[in-house]
Image: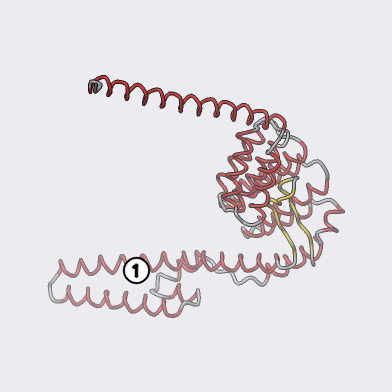
């Protein structure tokens, strides 16, 4: 006799539901066992060393973003591991190398807030300062380096931080402040970083810098194009003189023919260009000076090895400065 259709369908649904329950139960049991094993591994350090080593290898190969992921994995699995501070410092270094300076600064702040001490804290403070410098906050970076130097564990590391602070002043064209900072190094530091020849090169180079006065450029621009001539931009000067002269002549013709409204519009347009030309001369003087100062700092830097960042050793970040004068 054939089973009723309804009874057969009901039994099929029961079997399907039981099979689904069985699968879910097995998966849940496996996940629980895996979770227990993972917890034990985190406590005992099983597998964590491989994760950290892999992250270091990625960073050393320039795979900074993948390295960050692995450092995060390590910190997630073992936040209380003795190597957690080292991993966070290395992760900040990977962000730094990947030019993600805000992210690096965030991780460094978390590291210092968590109570990092000793050499780890010193490296975190130094890298924080460099992050500020790379983000364009030279004033904040200078103050940061000065503070980090005071907290340094030994005079040699303090000298390295002060040297970096001094070079920030050079890059900003604040040569007097740079001399003060360089002169504040210890006697051993001044010998190691060849401060005497550096100061001599700084003084002689400063005298030969071809700097332009923005005020002079603006004042000369009262005569259309003359400010650009002062800056050596003869083509810009010619264009400024030509257009300003042409608009002035056009306005005069309009008024002469009784077309006051049109003449007013021509004067308005010419005044805008005239003002823009003056602003361009002042801005050009600032840009010229910035290029000159950057070139001077670059030439000085050729005589000194200066680096601050993250190495991929178990010790994490490192500051390195050395003189070649």
Quadrant in the picture for residue 110: top right
Name the outermost residue toward the left: 258
Identified at 45% across, 74% down, the residue is 228
**Residue identified by numbered label 1:** 274
Q: Nearer the viewer, residue 201 or 23?
A: 23
What percent of the width, then of the height, locates residue 148? Answer: 72, 42
What percent of the width, then of the height, locates residue 243? Answer: 31, 76
Tell me the quarter of the image containing the C terminus: bottom right
Name the outermost residue toward the front: 1
What percent of the width, then of the height, locates residue 102? Answer: 55, 45
Identified at 36% across, 26% down, the residue is 16
Q: Is residue 33 left or right of residue 303?
A: left
> How are the residues colored?
secondary structure
Identified at 79% across, 50% down, the residue is 159
Q: Nearer the viewer, residue 73 or 279?
A: 73
Number of numbered discs on residues: 1
Q: Is residue 252 left or right of residue 299?
A: left
Tell me if residue 244 comes above or below residue 287 in the rendering.
below
Badge 1 element: helix
Count residues near mark 1 (Cα–Cα under 10 Å), then give few for <14, some for 14-19, many for 20+: many
Q: Nearer the viewer, residue 211 or 299?
A: 299
Tell me the quarter of the image containing the N terminus: top left
Quadrant in the picture for residue 224: bottom left
What percent of the width, then of the height, locates residue 292? Answer: 59, 69
């Amino acid at each position: 006799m054939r089973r009723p259709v309804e009874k057969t369908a009901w039994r099929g649904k029961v079997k399907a539901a039981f099979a689904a329950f069985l699968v879910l139960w097995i998966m849940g049991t496996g996940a629980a066992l895996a979770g227990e094993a993972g917890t034990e591994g985190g406590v005992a350090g099983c597998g964590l060393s491989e994760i950290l080593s892999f992250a270091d290898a990625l960073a050393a190969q320039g795979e900074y973003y993948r390295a960050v992921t692995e450092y995060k994995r390590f910190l997630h699995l073992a936040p209380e591991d003795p190597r957690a501070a080292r991993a966070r410092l290395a992760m900040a270094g990977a962000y730094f190398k990947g030019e993600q300076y805000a992210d690096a600064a965030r991780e460094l702040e978390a590291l210092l807030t968590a109570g990092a001490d000793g050499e780890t804290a010193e490296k975190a403070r130094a890298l924080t300062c460099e992050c500020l410098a790379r983000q364009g906050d030279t004033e904040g970076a200078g103050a940061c380096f000065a503070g980090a130097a005071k907290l340094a564990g030994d005079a040699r590391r303090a000298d390295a931080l002060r040297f970096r602070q001094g070079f920030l002043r050079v890059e900003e064209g604040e040569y007097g402040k740079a001399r003060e900072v360089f002169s504040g190094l210890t006697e051993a530091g001044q010998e190691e970083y060849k401060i005497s020849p550096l100061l001599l090169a700084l003084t002689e180079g400063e005298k030969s810098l071809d700097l332009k006065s923005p005020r002079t450029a603006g004042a000369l621009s009262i005569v259309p194009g003359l400010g650009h001539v002062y800056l050596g931009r003869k083509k810009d000067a010619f264009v400024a003189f030509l257009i300003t002269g042409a608009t002035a002549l056009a306005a005069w013709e309009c008024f002469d023919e009784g077309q006051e409204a049109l003449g007013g519009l021509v004067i308005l347009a010419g005044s805008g260009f005239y003002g823009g030309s003056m602003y361009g001369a002042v801005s050009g003087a600032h840009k010229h000076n910035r290029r000159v100062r950057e070139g001077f700092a670059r030439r000085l830097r050729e005589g000194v090895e200066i680096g601050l960042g993250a190495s991929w050793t178990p010790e994490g970040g490192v500051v390195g400065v050395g003189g070649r004068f």
